[in-house]
Amino acid sequence: MNKYLDIAPEVAAALAEGKPVVALESTIISHGMPYPQNVETALAVEKIVRENGAVPATIAIIGGRLKAGLSPEEIEYFGKKGPEIAKASRRDLPVLVAKGQDGACTVTTTMMIAHMAGISVFATGGIGGVHRGAETTMDISADLEELGQTPVMVICAGAKSILDLGLTLEYLETKGVPVIGYGTDELPAFYTRKSGFGVDYRLDTPAELAAAFHAQRAMDLKGGMLVTNPIPEEYSMDADVINAAIDQAVADCKAQGIHGKATTPFLLARIKGITGGDSLDSNIQLVFNNARLAAKTAAELSKLA
Ligand code: PSU
Ligand code: MN
């Protein structure tokens, strides 16, 4: 086992017994939501995973240790420190670990550490992708590369239109990543259930998701699987309202010269500001919804192992 990895005892026991485990990310706690809603949400998500039959493993880097499974105190610490904690992507791991520092795990590093620990299913809100204007900025999230090389199923609510959704789908196709719509033929756009873009396949039950991932793994195919789960109707936002907020946030980002790893956190915070907090409520509910599906899918997958 990787000497920098710490698997929480409860998570290690579940993995050893072949019981379902769901990975959860920590950038959503430190950079994606304000304190104290971030801590409340992270703890509530863990509870939902348990209620649906799986063990939660929130993933983060603490003092240079790669942690698969956090205590409630560690989650509180992460949420309180917020954006002071370094947002850690693949390129950040060597120096953070060597220096014994903290790091908030994005989709990329959560997939990596989940895989090191032997966890196959991961629930989050949204993934990074190809940014609008990437044809000149080259801003393409490392999340897409990770999906192309690490065998973890990522369950999200689609991608926000802070990204170029069409280019994001093209990139995933090139990398050989299956994009599945859960109960839908259309890629959900995070705050809304529709984007105008199709997914590769529609699957309708956790058992079908598990069977597809099991086949992918049994063939030893490189890479992950992206499951896009639409936000429940009652929490979805008005498309015109949210799209106007996103356009405004993207324009502000450009005008202020924000770039690199600061781009996504800036856009998320700006959208929340413009929508007066409505986007945060939707964001929390869609994460709950994804955690539920992930736990059920992990339970189905454990029957196939
Ligand atoms: N998109 C969201 N919410 C998030 C993120 C993306 O809707 O919290 C976070 C995730 O941790 C994701 C990361 O992996 O931002 C992508 O950052 P970047 O675009 O810099 O690769
Ligand atoms: Mn980027």
Image: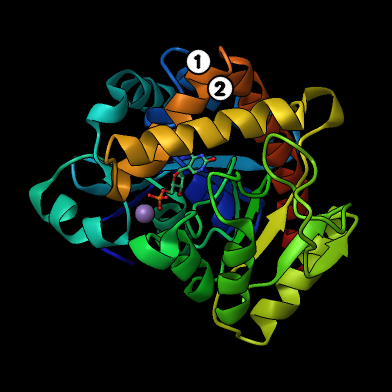
Which residue sits at x=56%, y=34%? Answer: 246
Counting from the top left corner in percent of width and height, residue 171 is at 55, 72
Q: CA distance from mark 2 to mark 1?
A: 6 Å
Is residue 265 visible in the rendered image? The answer is yes
Counting from the top left corner in percent of width and height, residue 204 is at 91, 56
Crowding at label 2, few (<14), some or many (≥20) Cα neighbours within 10 Å? many
Closer-to-camera residue (126/215): 126
Is residue 305 visible in the rendered image? The answer is no
Beta carbon of the mark 1 residue lies under 8 A of ligand 1: no
Identify whether 102 is placed above or below 305.
Answer: above
Which residue sits at x=45%, y=26%? Answer: 270
Which residue sits at x=49%, y=71%? Answer: 150
* Disc 1, SS: helix
Beta carbon of the mark 2 residue lies under 8 A of ligand 1: no
User: Picture quarter containing residue 120?
Assistant: bottom right
In this image, 205 relative to 200: left or right?
right
In this image, 124 relative to 302: left or right?
left
Q: Amino acid at mark 1?
A: Gln
**Number of the label disc, if any, that sits on residue 138:** none
In the picture, the quarter occupied by the C terminus is bottom right
User: Picture quarter containing residue 227?
Assistant: bottom right
Identify whether 116 is placed above or below 255.
Answer: below
User: Picture quarter containing residue 178?
Assistant: bottom right
Counting from the top left corner in percent of width and height, residue 262 is at 30, 41
In the picture, the quarter occupied by the N terminus is bottom left
Q: Residue at label 2?
A: 41
Which residue sits at x=46%, y=60%? Answer: 143
Quadrant of the displayed image that contains ligand 2:
bottom left
Counting from the top left corner in percent of width and height, residue 149 is at 48, 75
Q: Amino acid at mark 2?
A: Thr
Q: Are marks 2 and 1 in contact (CB under 8 Å)?
A: yes
